[in-house]
Image: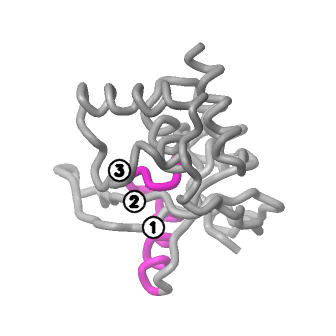
Amino acid sequence: MLPLFPLQAVLVPGAVMGLRVFEPRYLDMVGECGRSGHGFGICLIAEGDEVGAPAVPAEFGTEAVIEDFGTDDDGLLTLRVRGERRFRVLATSVRDSGLVEARVDWLEEVPSAARLRPEHALLGTLLERIFDQVGRPPGAEGSIDDAVWVGWRLLEMLPMPEERRAAMLGVDDPHKRLDGLLELIG
């Protein structure tokens, strides 16, 4: 079972996210992940809130791997996580602590050898312009010719409803993902 950290935000593969952890259920989860060397899942909240009663997670999520940790000025645990593998939630259960766990199906990723198609060249140019304006996100090393990488970076950086971002996690074909991004900006 994969422990989940439901949020009002979506983590995409390759993206970095900062988290502040203060609820006992998540502090325990971080400890377990540290001992086991495994990550946890981040899903958009489909129903509920980030704090309090266990939230219902969206159908798709991304495994979060802890890259760094520390404490903030208030003494709260801070994490820097990076998105890794995508998954589909098949079933959930809730521990006595309120931590949501899920049985998941890990989604296959198309190898990064998928080249950007001519009809998606505009998206590569858009990503380059975004990088010119705001810089590359931390650790965003990839090629503007790589359809998988361009799709994830645009999904990470473009403004859109989080529900749409979460739904795009379920799109396996990188070219279909890019088609969806073209519709969004078109």
Query: What is the C-alpha distance between the residues marked 3 and 2?
Result: 6 Å
Mark 2 to mark 1: distance in Å?
5 Å
Mark 2 in CB contact with mark 1 (< 8 angstroms): yes
Colour mapping used in the image: one colour
Say few, some or many: other residues with alpha carbon within 10 Å of mark 1 (under 14 / 14 to 19 / 20 or more). Answer: many
150 vs 157, nearest the viewer: 150
Q: Is residue 13 above or below residue 168?
A: below
Seen at 51% across and 71% down, the residue is: 39
**Label 1 residue SS:** strand
Tell me, yes or no, whether the highlighted magenta stretch contains residue 34.
yes
Q: According to the image, label 1 marks what residue?
A: 65
In the depicted structure, whether residue 91 falls above or below residue 50: below
Which residue is disc 2 drawn over? Answer: 81
x, y percent for residue 15: 42, 50
The image shows residue 39, relative to residue 61, as above or below, that is: below
Label 3: which residue?
18
Q: Is residue 159 left or right of residue 178?
A: left
Q: Tell me the quadrant of the picture where the N terminus can be found.
A: bottom right
Q: Is residue 160 left or right of residue 134?
A: right
Q: Which residue type does callout 3 highlight?
A: Gly
The answer to whether 30 appears left or right of 140 in the picture is: right
**In this rendering, does residue 125 appear at all?**
yes
Q: Earlier in the sequence, mark 3 or mark 2?
A: 3
- Magenta run includes residue 186: no
